[in-house]
Image (spheres, rainbow, N blue to C red):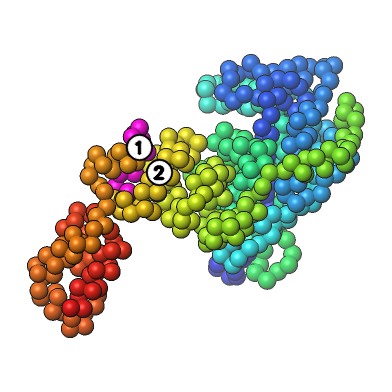
């Protein structure tokens, strides 16, 4: 669905393409043996190669190559058996070599695609290529009034740059694309997708064109956006900025811009370079990367189950709704947890508890499923008590957080608090009679045709029983009692 911008004169459509930089989960860098551990002391993980020392020769990291291949397979992309590393020349303080070893014309992964869910259904987003490159260092400008500092720990870390086709037409589609891409990489294990640490960040290419036009407008690139929320905000601001300029008779200048989250605006950084500005040429220190088809086949065979395949299997095997399946598989940890807990249990009840109480708890505590104290076995205990009628669903919700954070078993906690569900018909009949005797006027109105009062009577029975009465049994016995 297009994101339409209503200008003063015309309606405009935004056109979006993303270049996502994903750091490979590797213990060492792309061309050196230096550690990639996050949070180390500045400049403590820097080899001669990372520091750009003359005569230090790069050696390709085989593991990083394999991770690029499996990522390409996960993107339904072509794996190129021959690829070439180039030198991308530009000069910046945190790039000690004066060039970046990257790939351009002959990348390791070619065209592919992924599917995202939109308001109008499934949409395919094209992938132009995935190429390997080394990361730059980090410039630090906020620790001193007069000086900037350089930390080269990140210099040389292995990146996969995943370039999309300009197939997205709204901030929401861009957000869904990044979420889906990040999820695929997490399932594969090639990148942890942590945007706060900068392990996954996006350059967002934004242009606008008159609604109905097929011609692309001049694009501006918003660099290094490290949050899905910020990606959406940047697109909103930048697209409206461009429309305003065009409608006022100006022209869009192709440039690189930065997004300022505090102000919610993009600002010019520099004029946008073209490929010839970088003077790409094959790196003389690295021969062409030639892949064996046998290696590609092995990696393809060992590829883990990807989100879309898992989603379809959950729908088919457990009979759950597509919407619920999409939510569950959007986090690999949750999907694994769900698959373990659903065994021999009511799928509808498990889905309700995982996407309801469990998700709510994780959000309140701001933790992931891997950080949560509860195991699938422990939550299973609680769900089993609901299924066998020992505990009502409502009372289970009341004690959920205490149960999660405590060490007691579900049945011990229920017995200790006297929360065992009341399922004795005779006892429930006594409570129903008591409620009806106390509300004769309501009873008359109900029998006169005001059937909405049924919910009132159910509520009163639950109140008198302190929430312990079996809801299904209450409904059944109350219907009989009201007919008499």
Q: Of marks 2 and 1, which one's residue comes earlier in the chain?
A: 2
Magenta stretch: residue 374 in it?
no
Q: Nearer the viewer, residue 25 or 430?
A: 430
Label 1: element kind: loop
Task: Report the span colored magenta.
Answer: 396-409
Please tell me in which quadrant of the rendered image residue 169 appears.
bottom right
Q: Residue 195 placed where, x, y %? A: 57, 38
What residue is pinned by disc 1? 409
Q: Residue 297 placed where, x, y %? A: 82, 43
What residue is pinned by disc 2? 381
Binning the other alpha carbons within 10 Å of mark 2 as few (below 14), some (14 to 19) or many (20 upward) gives some
Q: Residue 406 placed where, x, y %? A: 34, 34
Q: Nearer the viewer, residue 427 or 62?
A: 427
Q: Quadrant of the C terminus?
A: bottom left
Q: Confirm or deny contact between disc 2 and disc 1 (CB under 8 A).
A: yes
Give me the residue at 70% from left, 69% from top: 213
**In screen coordinates, is 358 left or right of 33?**
left
Please tell me in which quadrant of the rendered image residue 414 appears.
top left
Q: Nearer the viewer, residue 175 or 336?
A: 336
Magenta stretch: residue 399 in it?
yes
Q: Is residue 462 above or below residue 271?
A: below
Q: Tell which residue pokes out farthest to the bottom in this image.
A: 448
């Amino acid at each position: 669905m297009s994101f339409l911008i209503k200008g003063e004169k015309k309606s405009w459509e935004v056109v979006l393409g993303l270049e996502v930089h994903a750091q490979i989960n590797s213990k060492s860098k792309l061309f050196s043996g230096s550690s990639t551990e996050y949070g180390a002391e500045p400049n403590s993980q820097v080899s001669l190669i990372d520091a750009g020392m003359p005569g230090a020769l790069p050696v390709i990291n085989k593991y990083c190559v394999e991770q690029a291949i499996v990522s390409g397979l996960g993107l339904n992309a072509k794996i190129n058996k021959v690829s070439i590393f180039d030198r991308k020349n530009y000069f910046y303080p945190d790039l000690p070599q004066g060039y970046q070893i990257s790939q351009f014309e002959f990348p390791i992964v070619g065209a592919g695609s992924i599917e995202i869910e939109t308001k109008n259904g499934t949409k395919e987003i094209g992938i132009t290529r995935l190429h390997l490159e080394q990361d730059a260092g980090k410039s630090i400008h906020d620790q001193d009034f007069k000086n900037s500092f350089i930390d080269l720990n990140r210099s040389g870390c292995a990146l996969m740059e995943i370039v999309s086709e300009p197939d997205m037409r709204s901030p929401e589609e861009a957000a869904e694309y990044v979420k889906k891409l990040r999820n695929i990489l997490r399932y594969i294990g090639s990148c942890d997708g942590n945007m706060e640490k900068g392990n996954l960040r996006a350059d967002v290419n934004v242009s606008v064109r008159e609604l109905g036009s097929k011609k692309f407008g001049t694009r501006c690139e918003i660099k290094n956006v490290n949050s899905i929320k910020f990606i959406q905000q940047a697109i909103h601001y930048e697209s409206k900025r461009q429309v305003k300029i065009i409608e006022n008779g100006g022209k869009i200048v192709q440039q690189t811009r930065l997004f300022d989250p505090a102000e919610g605006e993009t600002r010019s950084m520099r004029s946008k370079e073209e490929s010839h500005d970088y003077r790409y040429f094959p790196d003389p220190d690295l021969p062409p990367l030639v892949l064996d088809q046998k290696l590609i086949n092995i990696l393809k065979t060992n590829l883990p189950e990807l989100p879309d395949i898992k989603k379809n299997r959950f729908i088919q095997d457990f009979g759950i709704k597509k919407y619920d399946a999409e939510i569950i598989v959007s986090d690999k940890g949750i999907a694994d947890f769900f698959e373990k807990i659903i065994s021999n249990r009511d799928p509808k009840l498990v889905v309700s508890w995982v996407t309801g109480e469990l998700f709510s708890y994780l959000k309140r505590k701001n933790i992931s499923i891997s950080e949560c104290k509860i195991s699938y076995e422990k939550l299973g205990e609680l769900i089993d008590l609901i299924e066998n009628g020992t505990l009502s669903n409502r009372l289970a919700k009341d004690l959920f957080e205490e149960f999660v954070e405590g060490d007691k078993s579900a049945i011990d906690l229920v017995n200790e608090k006297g929360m065992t569900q009341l399922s004795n018909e005779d006892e429930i009949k006594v409570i129903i009679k008591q409620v009806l005797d106390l509300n004769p006027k309501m009873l008359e109105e109900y029998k006169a045709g005001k059937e909405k009062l049924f919910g009132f009577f159910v509520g009163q029975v639950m109140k008198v029983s302190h929430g312990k009465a079996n809801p299904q049994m209450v409904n059944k016995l109350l219907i009989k009692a009201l007919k008499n």
